[in-house]
Structure formats: C-alpha cells, structure tokens
Amino acid sequence: MSHQQFSSSLLENAVNEFAKLPGIGRKTALRLVLHLLKQPESVTESFSNSILQLRKEIVYCKVCHNISDTEICRICANPSRDKMTVCVVENIKDVMSIENTQQFRGLYHVLGGIISPMDGIGPKHLEIESLVTRAQNDGVKEVILALSTTMEGDTTSFYIFRKLDPLNIRITTIARGVAIGDELEYADEVTLGRSILNRVEFSNSFK
Amino acid sequence: MSHQQFSSSLLENAVNEFAKLPGIGRKTALRLVLHLLKQPESVTESFSNSILQLRKEIVYCKVCHNISDTEICRICANPSRDKMTVCVVENIKDVMSIENTQQFRGLYHVLGGIISPMDGIGPKHLEIESLVTRAQNDGVKEVILALSTTMEGDTTSFYIFRKLDPLNIRITTIARGVAIGDELEYADEVTLGRSILNRVEFSNSFK
C-alpha cells in the first residue's frame, strides 16, 4: 500500500493522519475515512470536535493526577469515597480497570509511569513526592500499591514503600494469585507459590 | 466495558466518538484517545483538521465521479492517460486497487454502487446514465466492466452491457481465473472452468 495512488490529496492527508494512530494501518485508515465520508457532515464534526476539545480542555486532578474535566476529579470530589485509603497506580487506565471492578471505594494516586532507568525515568519524573505529601497531610490511613509485578513495578513499589514506611501508615499491595477461572496446571510457579503463601480463610474467599 | 467508569466526560465523549467508527471497539477507542493525549496538541489538531477539511472540501469528479479535490479529478485531467478506454467500477476503493496495479492507463467511471433490489438500489441511483452519455459523446472506444462477480455485480454488468451495446463500442470485462500463487486443487470449479474457457497463448501469459 506504500505506492497507493490517491486521486485526492485531501483524502490522502486524512488517511495519513489516521494511519499515524497506533495499530491502525493504511488499509484500516482508508476504511475509516471512507466511512466518515459516507456519513453526514455532522458526524465528522462531532468526531473531530470531541477529540480537539478533549486535547485542549483536559486537566489532571490536583490531588490524584488522574485525568479530569475539573481541577479536582470526580473521584476525589465524591464525598462518599473513603479518603483514608489511597490506591497507587501507574496510569489512568489502571484507575479505570479498578473502578470497573466496583470493589474499591477509596481514592487513587496516579504516578504517571513507573521507575525505569532503561527509559530514563527516575522517581523525580513521577508523582511520588506528591504522594508522600498527601500521605503526611491528608489523614491517609492506608496506601495500597497496585503496580505491575515486573522488575520496574517492583522497584517502584519498593521505592515508595521506603518513602512511606516512616509515616506510620498501613502499606499494602494487591493480592497475587491464580486468576479466577484459571486451571492450577497452567499457573506459573511463582504465582502459585505466592497464592499458597497468601492463602485466605475459605469462608472469606467467596465474599 | 459498558459500565466503564470515566473520571472525565471529555474523555468519555472522545472515546464514544472513536467507538462509533467501524471495527473500533471501546477498548481500542480508549487506547487511541490516550495515545492522542500523550502527543503534543498539534498532533490532535492536524488529525482533526485533516478529516474536517476532507469532509467539507471533497468533491466528486464531474467526469468519472471519483473522489477529487477539484472539479475534474487528477486521473481525468492527466493528459497522458488514454481517454478512449473507460473502466467501470463500483466505488472509489476499486479505482485505488486498479491504480495500484499500475497496469491501466485509461480513465474510470465510478458507479457509486451496484444494482441491488434487496437494498432498494436501482439503475437510477447509480451513475449509469452519465456513463452512457460519456460513451456517446467523449470518443470512448472501449468500456471495461470491472464489477464483482456476485449476483448484483453480474446484474449490473449485464444492464450496462445492454445500454452500451447499441453504441458500437467494444465492451469487455476483466479476466476471471485462478489467482496467481493459488493451487488448482483449491480453486472453485466455476473459476477453474472459466479460466480454461478463457485460456490465453502461453507466450502472452507472462507479459
């Protein structure tokens, strides 16, 4: 498709722009653009306005650094959420994933990444200082570390743990174990080992 | 993902808009939107401008009804193309496919669809009258029918054939046969039969 002959440079531009998006090849880009061309003009207008407006007006919550329409995000501003429990995550996608479980009623703290010396990302590039300040001043009782169990995730968790440890607050991490629906036979040894060490009372397991 | 909790309605709008595109689910939509958010604002601007401009400024060539930036498209306006040969196709994607082969130096005629009574599309909805007028007045010597070999495609080809037949111009259709690289064993009988009937001189076959 690299030699694609376009009879219209307007079409070519639009296809090129779509093809810049991750995971969208030139064939898909063409299909999407031709789809928009078939719809009424208002469809294209509301499509482009929504992303332009998002890009121009979006802000990050001053408290948790989650994506937000306002200075303080919906979650932090919600009076019914438990302000004493803060869940630390890497990015806003993780906030959404946890919110979707509907199992967490506390607040979040979005680091904006994880410590990764290979990518030149150190603690200074992340919202770690603001987490410590928050933990010191906002009456936080528990910080839940919900980072990936990769080398970088573990490093970040440990770095945060050492920063928060002197503050006399509870520091927890999410449970690791065999996923629900998975067969033991196919679970890796480390996960299975961890799930045995961190076993829970059977009577609590189906709550 | 239907219960996805968004902390931002701007984000939610943008994801909804992306998810309206064909083949883009809500997870992909979210990934694309977050990608745009990570890029400089100019990326989002040039992206939305390109599609807005396309939708507002695009025209259809007065001669061949192909998509175009100008009244007469690049192909029709190209003096080095053979104006005596017109290839009839269903839509602009077919024009691109044929242009990509770099084997055709004539002009096109885009019908804008094919006859499909089931979808309520009759000859009147397509650019068939304008094709006949073109064939009568523009010194056309040959019309190549390059429609799909479906029931609807064949119906349309035959309808056009009957309209053009009295005009004393050559009417051809693209060759059907076993695709290059395909094994005979897996070719369907109709295609294989057609490829035997329409066999060509071996000395011509690798030109």
Image: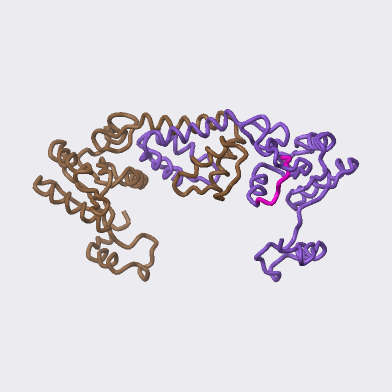
Chain colours: A brown, B purple
Q: Residue B153: x and y, percent? A: 76, 48
**Residue A169 horizontal/vertical position (percent):** 13, 46
Range covered by the magenta-colored residues: B102-110
Comparing A96 with B168, the one in front is: B168
Residue B202, placed above or below residue B131: below
Residue A132, percent from left and from top = 15, 42
Q: Nearer the viewer, residue A193 or A196?
A: A193
The vertical placement of A178 against B17, above or below, is: below
As for residue B107 lying within the magenta part, the answer is yes
Q: Residue at x 15, y 38 (%)?
A: A133
User: In the figure, residue B165 lies in which quadrant?
Assistant: top right
**Residue beneath the point at 43% across and 32% down:** B45
Report whether residue B96 is seen: yes
Q: Position of residue B77 (x, y in %)?
A: 68, 35
| Residue A56 vertical placement versus A184 (above, below) | above
Q: Is B14 contained in the magenta span?
A: no
Which quadrant does the C terminus of chain B fall into?
bottom right
Asked whether B197 or A111 is in front, the reply is: B197
Q: Which quadrant of the figure contains the N terminus of chain B?
A: top left
Residue B116 makes an appearance in the image? no
